[in-house]
Image (cartoon, helix red, strand yellow):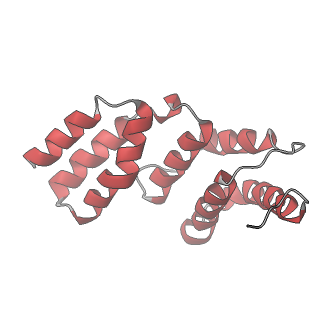
Amino acid sequence: MALIDKLIFSSKNLSVDGQLDISKSLLLSIYDIASEPIKKNLKDYILTIKSIDVKEKHDYLIFELLLIIREFRKINQKIIEELSDYFKQFADSRKFSSIFYVLNDQIDYLIEEKDYLELKPISKKIKVLIENYEKSERLSIF
């Protein structure tokens, strides 16, 4: 457990973006195979990360949805509103991001596997954005 404590301690010195990256790429993988005391330490640390402070809003949303998928958190109205607001900004826009696919997959998983039906309206918005992009002339195939 001392090694995990050192890893957590070192992670705290990283930027919020770095903390999210190490949590997604390493700590959650360790969590999957860890003993209960180590799981508790990892979960306690991960839940203290102020993900709202990341540079990019989509990184925050992806991380928060990941925590919900992993059952570290429950879905709440705040995250639903933030997702809705995030996609609203693209409704009449010519902007598109591959991040839409990631968020779409996470939201679909939460709807289908965790029965979070309150995400269906957001899922529809994302699918329309993706469909519009895929039908547009902007789509380049390499």
Q: What residue is at 87 percent from the left and 59 percent from the top?
A: 132
Answer left or right for 6 relative to 120: left
Is the residue 73 above or below the residue 106 in the image? above
Left or right: where does residue 35 sit relative to residue 136?
left
Could you say where residue 107 lies in the image, as x and y percent from the top left? 63, 59
Q: How many marks?
A: 0
Q: Is residue 98 left or right of residue 31?
A: right
The outermost residue toward the front is 142
* Above-or-below relation of 42 to 102: above
Q: Position of residue 96 (x, y in %)?
A: 77, 49
**On the rendered image, what quadrant is the C terminus found in?**
bottom right
Q: Can you tell which quarter of the image residue 139 is in? A: bottom right
Which image quadrant for residue 108?
Answer: bottom right
| In the image, farthest residue toward the left | 2
Figure check: 81 above or below 129: above
Question: Which residue does the image show at 33% across and 31% down from the upper left?
Answer: 14
Which of the two residues, 136 or 5, is positioned nearer the viewer here? 136
Q: Residue at x 87, y 42 (%)?
A: 93
| Residue sticking out furthest to the bottom | 112
Q: Position of residue 30 (x, y in %)?
A: 26, 58
Where residue 81 appears, x then y in whole percent?
69, 40
